[in-house]
Image: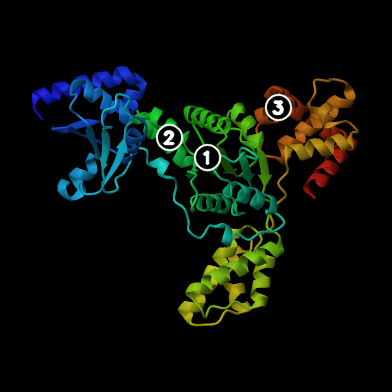
Amino acid sequence: MNNTEQDRWSRVKGRLRTSVGEDVYTSWFARMDLESVHDESVHLSVPTRFLKSWIQAHYADRVLTCWQAEMPEVHRIDLTVRSAIRAAVPVKEAAAPVEVRRVERTDGRPAPELRSVATAPVSASHDALGGSPLDPRLTFASFVVGRSNTLAHAAARQVAEGRRGDPVMFNPLYIHAGVGLGKTHLLQAVTWAGNSGSERKVLYLTAEKFMYGFVAALKTQTALAFKEALRGIDVLVIDDLQFLQGKSTQAEFCHTLNALIDAGRQVVIAADRPPSDLESLDDRVRSRLAGGLVVEMGSLGEELRLGILKSRVAAARVHHASFDVPEEVLDYLARTITHNGRDLEGAINRLLAHSKLNNQPVTLEMAEREVRDLIRPQEPKRIKIEDIQRVVARQYNVSRSDLLSSRRTANVVRPRQVAMYLAKTLTLRSLPEIGRRFGGRDHTTVLHAVRKIEALVAKDTALSEEVESLKRQLQE
């Protein structure tokens, strides 16, 4: 490239900066290079497919107009991903197939073309927007429906079957459950179904991948591009939201959530607890999440566990036709492995491996021996602050709203203090979180209530028995 071409390119970049503004220029054009100028065409390059596709879709006419201000004879711009050209095959081999975009003109002259030379796949700076990996097994067809997940399954199917432009019934759809109860299965099923023959753009991201993408965009000074691309998604699916950390990342997630919902785009989210229990998230985010449809997937009942086991055996027999698990073994596994679905799948994998490697049929004796470490003691019931408030209010003949109010009469203060004490002793919630759930009180108020009840229980037998009775009711 000679000095004349370099000077022209500098002036074109100046025109672009003036035309689109400093922020947009920095995000999209700062890393665009001039490769060559030949007759009526200009060859430009960018480092990623993401930049190439975005410029091609949104700024084709701007780029061409700025060049024509310097060189009126230019009617075509070739835009390539330079890393693919320099690292892969020779340019003349890569330049065969082209994608043509016509730019509308108003002066009657032939419409110029912005042409994108086809290139080999390359790693994009915004590779988070490629989505997190999907497991091909996690589809609606392989999801076993039972009493504990019927509503979550129906809501997820409703989202997956929607079309672009359809009104959104509930937004966001927020699914929460413990480990191994099917949250990720449902979210990936939504993604697979949404991307199968649909015109909608469905993106599945873990919270970790979202954080990585945003931080990477900040480092490469392409945060604006990252934001614009996310806001162009039709269905955004976020898994494991409880792992979202960082003030700036959470702020960006909140802005993205608001922008998508306000634009009528669908958001689907999964976490291991309800929005109100995500203490690390900003109040605004929790409020927006709670404003959609919040669905809990409960623990797996024995009938559902048996269905999952039969489904996994059927899937295994696709590749191992002789694999067979007797009904009595399936009943034993469903009855004794109660923790989560992953333990059930692990049990079938163990039986399959033992049967194939030792060339032995599956028996009840073998199953008892191979899965004994998966038979875990029953976990204590997970107690929620809402449950504590309801049970205490009923015990003391006051309303739940009384417990959350600012009333300081004796018949309300003591039940409120008992409820705060139970919340501290029976849950893992912090003092600030408990205070927030009791009408926005300060954590020092909660601490005072806990110490007050502790002292009274030690010397007041009647109160001690009341508290123990409340604990039994909550733990049953």
Q: Which residue is mark 2?
A: 229
Q: Position of residue 453 (x, y in %)?
A: 80, 31
Residue type beneath disc 3? Gly
In this rendering, the answer to whether 251 lies above or below 306 is above
Q: As drawn, is 403 to the left or to the right of 350?
A: right
- Where residue 39 sits, quadrant-wise, is top left
For badge 2, the amino acid type reads: Ala
Camera-side residue of 222 and 302: 222
Amino acid marked by disc 1:
Phe
Which is in the foreground here, disc 1 or disc 2?
2
| Image location (x, y in percent) of residue 133 | 44, 51
Image: 29 above or below 331 = above
For image coordinates 17% across by 27% down, the residue present is 73
Q: Which image quadrant: the N terminus?
A: top left
Q: Could you say which disc has been placed on residue 243 in the image?
A: 1
Q: If you read the primary sequence from the N terminus, does the residue marked by circle 2 or circle 3 appear first? A: 2
Which residue lies at the image location 31% right of the left edge and 41% below the top edge?
49
**Which colour style is shown?**
rainbow
Secondary structure under badge 3? helix
> Which residue lies most toward the bottom here?
360
Q: Are marks 2 and 3 in contact (CB under 8 Å)?
A: no
Between 84 and 474, the one nearer to me in the picture: 84
Sort mark 2 into few (<14), some (14-19) or many (20+) by Cα contacts within 10 Å: some
- Say whether residue 228 is visible: yes
| Numbered disc 1: secondary structure | helix
Q: Residue at x 50, y 75 (%)?
A: 354
Question: To which quarter of the image does residue 307 belong?
Answer: bottom right
Which sits in the foreground, 196 or 400? 196
